[in-house]
Amino acid sequence: MKFYSLNNPDLQASFKEAVIAGIAPDKGLYFPDSITPLPADFFKNIEQLSNHEIAFKAIHQFVNEDIPNAVLKEIIANTLDFDFPVVPMEENVATLELFHGPTMAFKDVGARFMANCLGYFSQGEKQDVTVLVATSGDTGGAVANGFLGVEGVKVVILYPSGKVSDIQEKQLTTLGQNIEAMEVDGTFDDCQRMVKSAFLDKEITDHKKLTSANSINVARWLPQLFYFLFAYKQAKSNGKEIVFSVPSGNFGNICAGMVAQKLGMPVKHFVASTNVNDVVPKFMENGIYEPVPSKATISNAMDVGDPSNFIRIQHLYQGNLETLRENLSSYSFSDEETREAMKKIHAQSGYVMDPHGAVGYLGLKEYQKDYPDTYGIFLETAHPVKFLDVVEHTLGLSPEIPPQIQKVMGREKKSHLIKTYEDLKAFLLATA
Ligand SMILES: *Cc1c(COP(=O)(O)O)cnc(C)c1O
């Protein structure tokens, strides 16, 4: 199996090459040239498999011969050492909690898997790989944690000064070792622009092997398909058709779910739930894809105006909107609706949803208006404590701070304050 660039199918790469490069030389996203369904037995007997066995069988064809089986098993064991419970919420509604990892964001799995793969590929290489990543909050912490101490890999994280939460800032500025935090006097868009400029800057790329740790990287994108298989394993016995509602920003997570479906997992339908950044809901309605600048919301990890992975979803459906509509619905919700949902669920059951999970819940309920007899699972992508201000303000309560978060809160912040791209460039060249 090979990966090819979505801009040009003749531009091919192995898994290893795709992971190291991040993006194809023509700036296209890499896509697997085949997705071979798993044997029917796999789904029939999935309850008897451990999460590690499920993950290995599901990811093996994509990794191919590039990582020996024993090493791949070790990588999976390092990546998946926490739980992914499906928690019943209402009749025919449950949530898949993806926040039990080290930084309490669902990005932990992709970040750890990619870090381990890159660490393996860097063994015996003379030159370090530098992972350059811009974050609006959650990605930075997950990447910092996943890559900490990985030999042969340096990580440089750009974040907008004063625009991430205290917890998020601590998670990405206090680890030290091979992790550097660049605090940018600007917005998230400025951070992203600087990262893009660095990738195109020959003075830097002649000296340094740069790669990205966003979900465009196949090693961060594909392992997200594990979640859907773990949920299926837990929900299968109730016998109803399953619907997944995924709170979506860059659409990497939901697209990985669709790959799980291509592997043969029975799913009735996907719902892409967004905040008011509604490029995809609009596209599903009128067939016109129109990127716009992102708007700030309380579910800020989904404030994306031009979702990078949506092109992969369109490719899965050969650009056919009608067949895509049969399998995907997409709805957008305001901050007010999101807060109302958080309040309703809390009053009903005492469960505290984070704003992203709440958007997922709303999308599921919208779909189930027409299909009430389905079993709906919405993904909870972050622990409520990661969005403490919103939760406190909406529900009037303070969730208890879990130990893995408490641990970083007491540590000392270390960051490099920068203003312009030239500042970043000087830093990268000085550390060549
Ligand atoms: C990144 C993120 C999302 C969006 O995931 P995509 O794969 O970009 O669609 C949703 N919720 C949280 C909490 C996130 O951190």
Image (cartoon, rainbow, N blue to C red):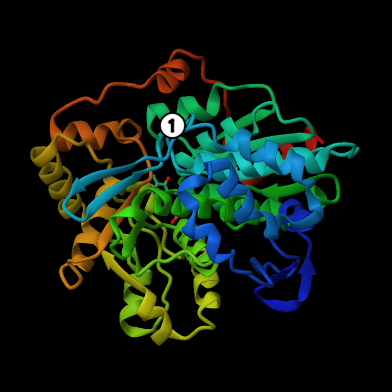
Query: Which picture quadrant has residue 352?
Result: top left
Which residue shows up at 33% across the image and 57% down it?
Answer: 295
In this image, 375 relative to 181: left or right? left
Q: Is residue 308 above or below residue 316?
A: above
Front position in the image: 75 or 329: 75
Is 119 placed left or right of 388 in the picture? right
Q: Quadrant of the C terminus?
A: top right
Q: Quadrant of residue 17?
A: bottom right
Residue 279 in the image, given as x and y percentages of width and height:
37, 70
Q: Quadrant of residue 162?
A: top left
Q: Is residue 264 visible?
A: yes
Residue 181, percent from left and from top: 59, 31
Name the quarter where the N terminus is drawn: bottom right
In the rendered image, the vertical position of residue 142 relative to residue 421, given as above or below: above
Residue 365 located left or right of residue 180: left
Query: Disc 1 marks which amino acid?
Result: Gln
Q: Which residue is mark 1?
A: 168
Image height of 317 relative to 246, above or below:
below
Identity of the residue furthest to the top in this view: 410
Task: Locate residue 385, reporting x and y percent.
Answer: 32, 30
Which residue sits at x=54%, y=26%? 173
